[in-house]
Every structure is written in structure tokens, then in C-alpha cells.
Amino acid sequence: QVQLVESGGGLVQPGGSLRLSCVASGTIFRVDDMAWYRQAPGKERESVATIASGGITSYAASVKGRFTISRDNTKNTLYLQMNSLKPEDTAVYYCNTELWSPIGRGMQYWGKGTLVTVSS
């Protein structure tokens, strides 16, 4: 059974940094696109950043220049380096990936999320 587990969230002051990680485990044949989403209190879940298997990245306008998404294909691990954090970055951050497993091809999986709180 495939699982995604995020880590690295916490409380940080405005202007600070955090690095999120997401590990995909289980029987995995191939990992395609990987992405970070976030959901702030009272708001809908939104895309933060995406990285293709070949390394091409895209970012939401609100985080461009402050966040960096990366991946380690040898470890099926996704990262999000978050710098210059702002209070409006406060949210639960979710890992999302499309992968191939014994269950099927190109299936979407979600982690349970990690909370990031930006506050003084």
C-alpha cells in the first residue's frame, strides 16, 4: 500500500524558513508529477508548487521567489524549501503525487498534511 508522509512543519516567525519533506513509501513502480498544496483555515485547498519527473517546476504567484520545490527520485522524496515566510503562508501543507503501483497507473495520492504556522 502506498503512503505519503509529510514532515517539517511547525511554528516560525515572519521572515523565517522551514523545509518540508514528503516520503512516498510502498511498492512503487514509477513516480510522475509531485506537488505541494496548502489549505488555510476557512479557505479552499490551493496548489503551491509542482515538479515534473524531469525536474520542470511551476509555482503559485504568491510563493514564487520565496519557495523552492525539489525532489530526490532515488528516495521517492519531495521537498519544499520555504523562505521569507509570511503570516498568510499559515496553512496545512499537503503532498500530492501521481504514481504507478500494483494498484494502477497514474493514480493520485495525498499525504495527511503538516501544519505550518507563521506568527510572531
Image (cartoon, rainbow, N blue to C red):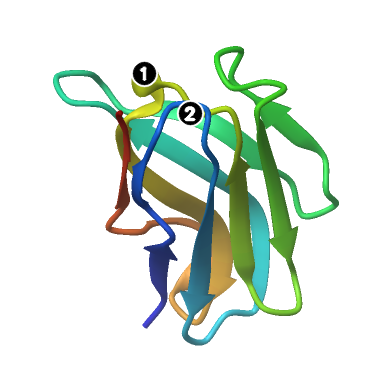
Amino acid type shown at disc 1: Glu
Circle number at residue 21 = none
Residue 102 vs residue 13, the one in the foreground: 13
Q: Nearer the viewer, residue 86 or 54?
A: 86
- Residue 29 placement (x, y as % from top left): 64, 79
State if disc 2 and disc 1 touch (CB < 8 Å).
no
Q: Which image quadrant for residue 105? A: bottom right
Left or right relative to 57: residue 93 = left
Q: Amino acid at mark 2?
A: Ser
- State which quadrant residue 110 falls in: bottom left
Q: Residue at x 50, y 42 (%)?
A: 36
Q: Residue at x 59, y 22 (%)?
A: 63
Q: Which quarter of the rendered picture does the N terminus lie within?
A: bottom left
The answer to whether residue 19 is above or below residue 64 is: below
Q: Nearer the viewer, residue 27 or 44?
A: 44
User: Among all residues in the image, which is located at the extreme top?
Assistant: 61
Name, please, the residue furthest toward the left: 42
Q: Residue 49 location in percent, x, y? A: 60, 34
Q: Is label 2 in a helix, a strand or a loop?
A: strand
The residue drawn where x is 43% and y is 59% is 8
What residue does disc 1 label? Answer: 88
Residue labelled with disc 2: 47
Instruction: Tell me how far mark 1 sits from mark 2, CA to CA.
Output: 14 Å
Q: Residues within 10 Å of mark 1 (few under 14, many from 20)?
A: few
